Amino acid sequence: MTKVFGHRGSKGYFPENTLLSFHEAIRAGVDGIELDVHLTKDRQLVVIHDATVDRTFDGSGYVKDFNLVDLKRLKLNQSFKSFTHYQSTWDLERIPTLEEALEIFALAKIDLNIELKTTQFDYPGIEEMVISCVKQYAPSLNVIYSSFHLPTLARLRACDPNCNIGFLVEQPIPLLQDYLKQFQLNKIHLDKSLIKHIKMTSDISMQDIKVWTVNKTSELIYFLNKEVDTIITDFPDRALQIRHEL
Ligand code: G3P
Ligand code: CA
């Protein structure tokens, strides 16, 4: 059965990559959650999508230029007030550390996809830090690490020969199966528009593919019928309902 992962928690309904968003995705019944990780100036792993805080929090600047204590002072950007479910309690949300997020997932016993955001900045050592953090705070969790950045994927594999790694693909890649073999990658994390470019071979099946970000009903039905491994969605409740009805 195709798994349903909440994208940045429940991004369609709640402030992305916050503990609130993760709790709500878990409450909806997701099989797993996808989140994004950056590194602060004082080398703390934090959960945020952009390299800067500007879009999602009420500050300005790169995550890499903040110490954790200063990041933790930031409140959510006012734009979240336009969300349907907005409540004033949302103002209590802060940028989570990876450790804080892992503690929730360890209790919920759901799967996790940690995307390392290393395309813009390399964050030396982040791969080993993320793997160590998971081993320390959620050792029994089923985790898959992903990145758009091939050197990060290679470093993840070097750090842990047994970990699960997903290759984030957003443009057609000739000889994709060669990359999978060369870097010992476990899954393809595919932009939904690229499914028509993927040729099923003895090396690649629908069970090797996690598709993002699938939100529309018609697309959800399409990928559920294709029986891809995982659908990553901003609206996990919608995906779970459709999966239940099919
Ligand atoms: O992991 C799938 C998806 O999250 C990758 O794109 O930009 O939403 O992090 P983005
Ligand atoms: Ca992501």
Image (cartoon, helix red, strand yellow):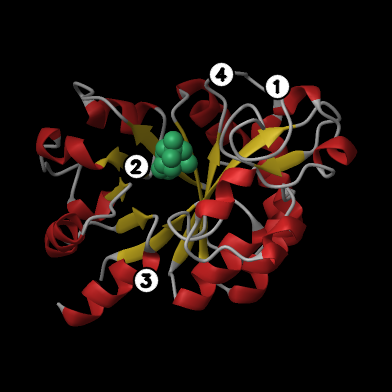
- Which residue is disc 1 drawn over? 124
Contact check, label 1 and label 3, Cβ < 8 Å: no
Left or right for 105, reference 199: right
Q: Quadrant of the C terminus?
A: bottom left
**Identity of the amino acid at label 4?**
Gln
- Which residue is disc 4 drawn over? 120
Q: Which mark is residue 237?
A: 3
Q: Is mark 3 on a helix, strand or loop?
A: helix
- Which residue is disc 2 drawn over? 189
Q: What element carries label 1?
A: loop
* Most distant residue in the right direction: 69
Q: In which quarter of the image is the N terminus?
A: bottom left
Label 2 CB less than 8 angstroms from ligand 1: yes
Contact check, label 4 and label 2, Cβ < 8 Å: no
**Mark 4 vs mark 2, CA separation in Å:** 19 Å
Contact check, label 1 and label 4, Cβ < 8 Å: no
**Mark 2 vs mark 3, CA separation in Å:** 21 Å
* Residue 52 % position (x, y): 64, 27
Which mark is in front, 4 or 2? 4
Q: Can residue 162 be seen in this view?
A: no
Task: Of the two numbered discs 2 and 3 on the same chain, state the one appearing first in sequence.
Answer: 2
**Identity of the amino acid at label 3?**
Asp
Q: What element carries label 4?
A: loop
